[in-house]
Amino acid sequence: MTMERRILVLGLGNILLQDEGLGVRAVERLAARYRLPPEVQVMDGGVMGLDLLPHLEGVTHLLITDAVQTDQSPGSLVRLEGEA
């Protein structure tokens, strides 16, 4: 039995705080510029926090786009996995 894939690309951030809206603007562009397969859903999660949990039910793959403060130069891609 193969499990059906359900992929969620989730954009986080507060568009009122300019740079913090990065994740939201990224998913907006993704949805506007590309035709995605039916198993891929794009969602603006804004600043919903724990209210997002019901939207994660049944998701098999999750990609979150957001801005984070690191010691790296601006625009660097950061991949966080597991406990990170």
Image (cartoon, rainbow, N blue to C red):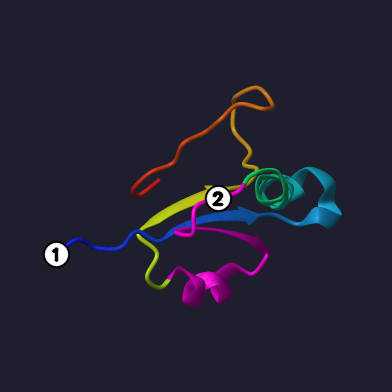
Label 2 amino acid?
Leu
Q: Nearer the viewer, residue 65 or 35?
A: 35
Q: Dividing the image into 4 quarters, which one contains the N terminus?
A: bottom left
Q: Which residue is mark 2?
A: 36
Res. 1 mark = 1
How crowded pointer 2 is (Cα within 10 Å; few <14, some 14-19, many 20+) is rated as few
Secondary element at tag 2: loop
9 to the left or right of 30: left
Label 1 amino acid?
Met
> What percent of the width, then of the height, locates residue 21?
75, 50
Question: Please, is residue 33 above or below residue 56 in the view?
Answer: above
Verify whether residue 48 appears in magenta.
Answer: yes
The stretch in magenta equals: 35-56
Q: Nearer the viewer, residue 58 or 70?
A: 58
Question: Please, is residue 74 above or below residue 16 in the view?
Answer: above
Res. 81 mark = none
> What percent of the width, then of the height, locates residue 8?
49, 58
Verify whether residue 20 appears in magenta.
Answer: no
